[in-house]
Image: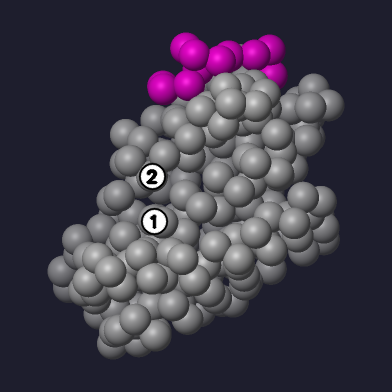
Amino acid sequence: MNLQLLNLLQLSDPTLPIGGYAHSSGLETYVQKGMVKNLETAQEFIMQMLTKNFKYTDAAFASLAYDAGVNHDFQQLLSLDQECSALKLPREMREASQKLGNRLTKIFQPLCSSEITEKYLDAIKSKTVSGHYCILFGLYAKSLQIDKKQMLTGFFYNTTVGFITNSVKLIPLGQQDGQQLLFSFLPVIDHLVEESMQPDRDLLGLCCPGFDIRCIQHESLYSRLYMS
């Protein structure tokens, strides 16, 4: 269990050098429009993003990809990748997911490759699939023998920390505000993990369209600190 925990800490480390710090997932648009401007509105944005978007998109795909790894179901993996690409409507979000996935493979493929990750990587190289970060996260967690519930905990934690870090930088907020936000979201993460253990395939892509609209608008902002 201790080795699994250490593997999880590395895989879900917010400072992992894959470029996650360069993406705000549309938050920069919300801040520039004055919709996210203080601690309260930052908390509301993160809550809505986690519960109304992320739960039905990246977290669900990570969960299902983990199951595909357990079952050695490569065709299921291909289907998930294609569906993930179709559901990421903003171009910047698709590209961000692919870039993060590509960098994740460069770190973990030499460390914990498996038959299914090898086949998936070959499909990425042949451009059969896109190679999304959430799918690769689930696959590498399985290869590292991380428990599924712990994998989802790390995945949600990593995402939450990313949103909080970006809020602190963009609004800006104080570091203590950031820690207050993180502490308030720990029970939320625990609840979302339980709900994401067995995602409903029919609900994939269920999200508030406002998030996609702000991500699309980000592409044409006058000034930008983030790539998405």
In percent of width and height, residue 59 lies at 63, 52
The residue nearer to you, when weighing 188 against 95, is 188
| Side of 170 where 136 appears, left or right | right
What span is colored magenta in the figure?
106-116
The residue nearer to you, when weighing 40 against 210, is 40
Q: Can residue 80 be seen from the camera position used here?
A: no
Say which element carries label 1: helix
Based on the picture, tell me whether residue 100 belongs to the magenta stretch.
no
In percent of width and height, residue 205 lies at 67, 62
Q: Which residue is mark 1?
A: 162
Give me the disc on residue 14.
2
- Residue kind at label 1, given as amino acid type: Gly
Quadrant containing the C terminus in the rendered view: bottom left
Quadrant containing the N terminus in the rendered view: top right
In percent of width and height, residue 15 lies at 33, 41
Residue at (68% x, 12% y) in the render: 115
Quarter-of-image position of residue 35: bottom left
Quarter-of-image position of residue 124: top right
Residue at (64% x, 46% y) in the render: 152
Residue at (30% x, 84% y) in the render: 38
Q: Is residue 208 above or below residue 62?
A: below
In percent of width and height, residue 116 lies at 69, 19
Do the residues under discs 2 and 1 have CB atoms within 8 angstroms? yes
Q: Is residue 116 above or below residue 13?
A: above
Spatial distance from mark 2 to mark 1, Cα to Cα?
7 Å
Mark 1 Cα-neighbour bin, 10 Å: few <14, some 14–19, many ≥20? some
Say which element carries label 2: loop
